[in-house]
Amino acid sequence: MAFTVNDLRDLTRLLLERPEWLGEVRRIVLTDELLSLPDIVRGLAEAQRRTEERLEQLTARVDQLTEAQRRTEQSLNLLVQAVHGLENEMSKARGILLEMRYRNRATSYFGRWLRKPHVVDVSDIWDDLEDKLSLDEIRELSNVDLLVRGQLHRKAGSGDMWLAVEVSNVIDEHDIERAIRRAELLRKAGFRSVPVVAGHNPLDTEVAEEIAESHVALLMNGSSAGWDEALSHALAGEQT
């Protein structure tokens, strides 16, 4: 028998009158899967909420770790800078001590090549320098680490010889350039002179080659090199 509109109306009326039947009708009309769908949706929503909470917690933790890493890196950079600064200060201190050693023991260090070597202050020869050098050149010469005056040994010649000495814990090309430049200023002012570099640490190969090629005398931890060549070059330059 066909289900008519009147039958539907009667069913609707009965369900309104007996609402407890609705659950049974739903169970019959809908499958258990569809009936459980709201619970599933609510469960998914709750799972999503918990996931978002955990994600927020994780994000906050990552931010904390990032900030901690930033502070650590900043502290590390400051520490590295402090160490570099300390190394520079220690290097300067070693250089000053080395310069004092050469200054206080000039006879011991330079007596092998000069008679009666002694340290001279540029101010002691200022009047002589003014006749030949500009004020800027005198100031440049005043920056020499050590200015040593002595007499040539009789076998090497006669008269005074001046040493423009640059002292550095680690000798580099700049020390060589300064020694040469300041020795040239002495020669320009009329003083026979030899550029000298004195240091403590072992030489770089390129620096050692430059010293040998530049007619610069070297003192290093009690050893020496290039002195005969440098003195001969200074005397030959005077003759020319």
Image (cartoon, rainbow, N blue to C red):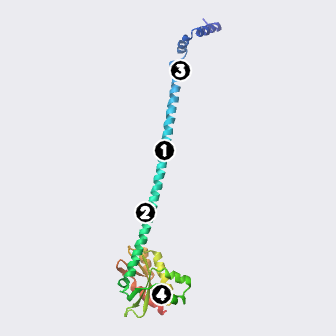
Which of pointers 4 and 2 lies earlier in the amino acid sequence? 2
Callout 1 amino acid: Val
Q: Which residue is mark 4?
A: 124
Q: Amino acid at mark 2?
A: Val
Image quadrant holding the N terminus, namely: top right
Residue, disc 2: 83
Specify whether residue 60 is in view: yes
Query: How many numbered badges does the structure rendering display?
Result: 4
Q: Position of residue 75 (x, y in %)?
A: 46, 55
What's the amino acid at mark 3?
Leu
Q: Which residue is identified by label 1?
A: 62
Percent position of residue 114, x then y: 38, 88
Lower position in the chain sequence, tag 3 or tag 4:
3
Give the residue at x 41% y 69%: 90
Between the C-alphas of marks 4 and 1, the distance is 70 Å
Q: Which residue corresponds to mark 3?
A: 34
Q: Is residue 13 above or below residue 219?
A: above
Crowding around mark 3 (Cα neighbors within 10 Å: few <14, some 14 to 19, many 20+) is few
Q: Are marks 3 and 4 in contact (CB under 8 Å)?
A: no
The tag on residue 138 is: none
**Relative height, residue 96 to residue 20 (above, below):** below
- Distance from disc 3 to disc 2, alpha carbons, whole Å, reads 72 Å
> Can you tell which of label 4 and label 2 is closer to the viewer?
4
Residue beneath the point at 53% across and 29% down: 45
How far is disc 1 from disc 3 in space, using C-alphas?
41 Å
Could you tell me how far apart the alpha carbons at marks 3 and 4 are, in whole angstroms?
A: 110 Å
* Mark 4 residue crowding within 10 angstroms, few (<14) / some (14–19) / many (20+): few
The three-letter amino acid code for the residue at tag 4 is Asp
